[in-house]
Image (cartoon, rainbow, N blue to C red):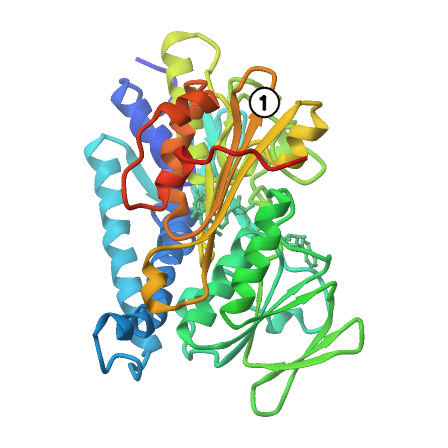
Amino acid sequence: MSEFDFDLFVIGAGSGGVRAARMAAAAGMRVAVAEDRYMGGTCVNVGCVPKKLFVYASSYREAFEDAEAYGWKGQVDARFEWPTLRDNNAMEITRLNGIYRNLLGSAGVQVIDGRAKLSGRQQVSVGDTTYSAERVLVATGGWPFVPDIPGSEHAITSNEVFSLEVFPRRILVVGGGYIAVEFAGIFAGLGAETHLSYRRELFLRGFDNDVRRFVRDEVGKKQVKLHFSHEVQSIEKQADGTLKVHGVDGSVLDVDAVLYATGRKPNTHGLGLEKLGVVLHKDGTIGVDDNFRSSVTSIYALGDVTGGPELTPVALAEAMALVKHWQTGKTAEIDYNNIPTAVFSQPNIGTVGLTEEEARQAGIPVVVYKSDFRAMRHSVSGRDERTLMKLIVDGSNDKVMGAHMVGPDAGEIIQGIAVAMKAGATKSVFDQTIGIHPTAAEEFVTMRTPVAD
Ligand SMILES: Cc1cc2nc3c(=O)[nH]c(=O)nc-3n(C[C@H](O)[C@H](O)[C@H](O)COP(=O)(O)OP(=O)(O)OC[C@H]3O[C@@H](n4cnc5c(N)ncnc54)[C@H](O)[C@@H]3O)c2cc1C
Ligand SMILES: NC(=O)c1ccc[n+]([C@@H]2O[C@H](COP(=O)([O-])OP(=O)(O)OC[C@H]3O[C@@H](n4cnc5c(N)ncnc54)[C@H](O)[C@@H]3O)[C@@H](O)[C@H]2O)c1
């Protein structure tokens, strides 16, 4: 009989924690997981899932408008009801919470509701109870970061945005990353006067520059008012509850809500990590080795709290790699190259591999293929929306090093391209592949003429 209550104690039932707990239990380990907020973590409750549902909701306005040209009359005056979306979303999330709890239960994982902290190198306390475990896995994710400016207490974050009492008729979104661009699209689509403030000259840093410029133009067409090189100095609440936002440049914006999407900080506060000697990076994320082990041998960590790519599939892959490592004793196998990702902006961004700038910086003799076109749907609807596709090819060996798309369903399309790139596909393999007609995706296998240098 083991001297420990559990073989594994997981702190946090989010994407990574749930997957690790279930896999470890399936491998025969005695597992507990503590969760103090919501089953399924950020992705299920205040992230990927509700975000995507809200993106769907916001896409109907244009669909109604476009339908006219296809013979459907009477939809343009449709009225949007925020409480219906908000409450149906909440119901769906509650359903998913139940599914996650059941999945853990049926895998034989003991679920402990409450805030956990490490009280020893192999001890976890939840409330008044202390459990011992051979291994502890910290999968506590992150929390929105809001810069400390006067009036920041009036701002909301992605944690609150899905459950607002009243729909904001005018909203300012602050930030230039995934969340800011996604929510600017959501609120514009739902009919709010939408502003986006970004402190530098162009948002979506790290994405291919053509993609960034293209998204700027497309998002601009969708009535999002872009304020680049703009910094919020303070937020002032008015007697009527509205907000006056003062810019460093002296500008003033009157809105009903300010949504901060300025990055996330790891949830390490109050866990007792430092006291036990767990080494944290400067930004508070937990330092781990290739096997997700922290500087204390019994304590492991994965997912957002370790500061890698903050994506659900990455947390899931890490969880599976870690449990496999425990089972086999072999080094955890995980490939962080060519992780595909999508921004659910409108239109979507889908991207995998190197940007043109990264490829050039790496000294690769770059050959670029690019296509910019109006999707077939809009030849009849007349909507001025364009699609961009771009391939980055290594001229020395013909390998496709990067694929980027801005357009409807870009995430769906790029997933398949990511498989091809993982298999080492060359441009000539793309060329030999027969397209599916008529689709936008076929453009990826029909681009023949490189962009002139
Ligand atoms: C608005 C938004 C949209 C997103 N959209 C996408 C997307 O479209 N695609 C994508 O791939 N990723 C998306 N992400 C990122 C994704 O949600 C995260 O990368 C993912 O959830 C990380 O999983 P995790 O297991 O590391 O942490 P989390 O899912 O954050 O789980 C951590 C869990 O630990 C719990 N916890 C924390 N401290 C304690 C404690 N002391 N005791 C007990 N429990 C604790 C928390 O309550 C939480 O449930 C989005 C994120 C946000 C905020
Ligand atoms: N579709 C998806 O897969 C998806 C969607 C949402 C979030 N996520 C994940 O969640 C993470 C967090 O999202 P995010 O958008 O909050 O972060 P982000 O890191 O993508 O973007 C943060 C933005 O805030 C800006 N910023 C930072 N500090 C600031 C300050 N003091 N003042 C003004 N601006 C400031 C940054 O310049 C940047 O543009 C992302 O990195 C991503 O990995 C993924």
User: Residue, x 28% and y 32% (percent of image)?
Assistant: 109
In what quadrant of the picture does the C terminus appear? top right
Q: Amino acid at mark 1?
A: Asp
Image point (80%, 78%), residue name: 250
Instruction: Give the quarter of the image for residue 293.
Output: top right
Left or right: 89 in relation to 393: left
Image height of 189 relative to 100, above or below: below
Which quadrant would the N terminus be assigned to in this image? top left
Can residue 132 be seen?
A: no
Image coords of residue 7 (percent x, y) = 37, 21
Q: Residue furthest left?
A: 106
Locate residue 449 relative to residue 76 in the image: left or right. Answer: right
- Where is ligand 1, by quadrant? top left
Residue in the foreground of this view, choosing between 184 and 411: 411
Callout 1: CB less than 8 Å from ligand 2: no
Q: Residue at x 52, y 20 (%)?
A: 399
- Among the 4 quarters of the image, the one containing residue 318: top left
**x, y percentage for residue 92?**
26, 58
Residue beneath disc 1 = 394
Residue 158 screen position, x and y as percent: 49, 60
Q: How many marks?
A: 1
Residue at point 46%, 29% (across, down): 137
